[in-house]
Amino acid sequence: MSGAARTGWPCWSAGRCWWRAGGLLPDGPRLALWSLAALCDLAAPLVFRRRLAVVAYHPAHMPERFALFLLVALGESVVGIGGPAAAARLDAAELAAVAAAFTISAGLWWQYFVYAADAMRHAVETADSRRDVIRRIFQYGHLALAAGVIGVAVGFEETVADPGEALGAGSVALLYGGCGLYLLTFGYTRWMMFRRVAVTRLVAAALVLALLPAMVRLPALVVLVVLAVLLVALNAVEHVRVARAAAGAAREIAAEESVAVPADRSVGGPV
């Protein structure tokens, strides 16, 4: 048993038993027992934070495991697209809905795996307290990321199946609310890691949530396309900003190196 497992086994063992016991109960008691089990699992990193401080974490292990956890959630969003599409006769509208939904899933993948995953790994490697980074960013932050992705995945089941019909408030809330939660969580993780504001993602999250009421009466295809366009635009803006920042850093390094060259190197011909 690992050090982390030995440290928090009372809470985690109790939670595991309650999860299993809840599956044998009717709806009301099951929900109560599962809620207690979830609360126990969520509380364990806080309750045992001092004892977890002595656990040695490899800087690459936790980021890799939680990235795989999020990848599974993103896979569920693809399943949410393919399941309804496989059961339908695909006309032009349904094909467009599938394409838009897949673009949304790809956009969510891009936001995590292109930039955020490396930033989180760097935060673990350079942190004074890896325990705090892992608790705040991975154990809690990734729970919110996965919840947002799963909300989007459930919303896909309604939109792809009937793209011409208006969605109810529930389906739109799952799609736009899940996407908004996903983007807002990056604002939380960036602040926890570097004490910096993720301006582009927070602005995008605010825009997604502001559009939510207007999407309720629109056809599902329009709802998907609008969200896909927003995510593509966000990723394009971030790509340009990162490219410009990298180019600026390269120019600064080149300027510093040129200043560091002795002035007399150019005098007296080749050495």
Image: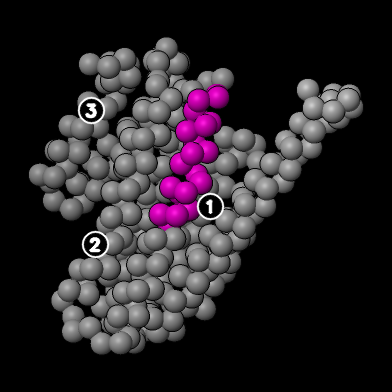
Distance of label 2 from label 1 (alpha carbons): 24 Å
Q: Using the image as rendered, state which of residue 103 and residue 262 is in the foreground.
A: 262
Q: Is residue 1 above or below residue 148?
A: above
Dot in front, 3 or 1: 1
Residue 259 x, y percent position in the rendering: 83, 31
Q: Is residue 32 above or below residue 227?
A: above
Q: Earlier in the sequence, mark 2 or mark 1?
A: 2
Element class at badge 1: helix
Residue at the (45%, 29%) spot, across then down = 134
| Residue range corresponding to the magenta coloring | 108-127
Give the Cα distance between marks 3 and 2.
32 Å
Locate residue 149 relative to residue 190 in the image: left or right.
left
Q: Position of residue 69 (x, y in %)?
A: 31, 42
Does residue 170 appear in the picture of this structure? no
Q: Residues within 10 Å of mark 2 (few under 14, many from 20)?
A: some
- Asked if the residue at tag 2 contacts the one at tag 3, i.e. Cβ–Cβ closer than 8 Å, the answer is no
Q: Earlier in the sequence, mark 3 or mark 1?
A: 3
Contact? badges 3 and 1 (CB < 8 Å)? no
The stretch drawn in magenta includes residue 111? yes
The C terminus lies in which quarter of the figure? top right
**What colour scheme was applied to this rendering of the protein?**
one colour
Q: Position of residue 233 (x, y in %)?
A: 55, 66
Q: Amino acid at mark 1?
A: Leu
Identity, as a three-letter code, of the amino acid under mark 3: Ala
Q: Quadrant of residue 223?
A: bottom left
In the picture, the disc for residue 184 is: 1
Question: Given the image, on which type of amino acid does mark 2 rest?
Answer: Val
The disc at residue 14 is: 3
Q: Residues within 10 Å of mark 3 (few under 14, many from 20)?
A: some
Taking depth in this image into account, of 270 and 139 the one nearest to the observer is 270
Indicate the position of residue 186 as horizontal and vertical percent values. 52, 47
Residue pictured at 65% horizontal, 41% vertical: 196
